[in-house]
Amino acid sequence: MKVGDLKAHSEQCQFYPVACPNAGCDFVAARHLIKDHTPLLCEFKTEICQKGCQKVLKQSEMQSHNCIASLTAEVKMLRANDLIMREDVNKQGEHIKELQT
């Protein structure tokens, strides 16, 4: 093999080490083996919840996922963030009033 052909070969070689494409997974295997790991075994594989909430979940979370509890927690977080932002806006308004006087 010519050195100039090495890059092209490594992009197609079935024995070249490839990392799992799922975020958070550090599994590395030969290219021909990675296809067996990704859809079946990787606990970091994500799917969209088909029960109704459409959240992106790890495959390992799918069985125990509760849409109502998940969405309730998300609403609470959004309300808390809204409250913090409102307080920041009020503080900025008070600061501007102080500067104007």
Image: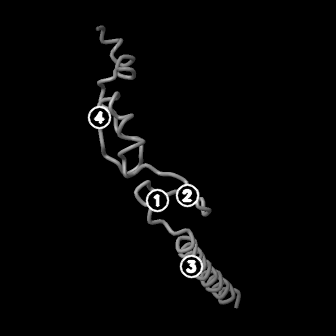
User: Do callouts 1 and 3 mark residues in contact (Cβ within 8 Å)?
Assistant: no
Residue carrying label 2: 49
Q: CA distance from mark 4 to mark 2?
A: 29 Å
Q: Are marks 2 and 1 in contact (CB under 8 Å)?
A: yes
Given this view, does label 4 or label 2 mark the residue nearer the observer? 2
Give the mark nearer the N terminus: 4 vs 1: 4
Task: Name the residue carrying label 1.
Answer: 62
Which callout, 3 or 4, points at the residue further toward the start of the chain? 4
Q: Is residue 84 above or below residue 29?
A: below
Residue at 34% across, 29% down: 31
Label 3 – label 2 distance at C-alpha: 20 Å
Upstream in sequence: badge 1 or badge 3: 1
State the residue position of label 3. 76
Q: Quadrant of residue 39?
A: top left
Q: Earlier in the sequence, mark 4 or mark 2?
A: 4
Q: Where does the image place residue 3, in percent across and percent down from the top left?
A: 30, 12
Circle nearer the N terminus (2, 1):
2
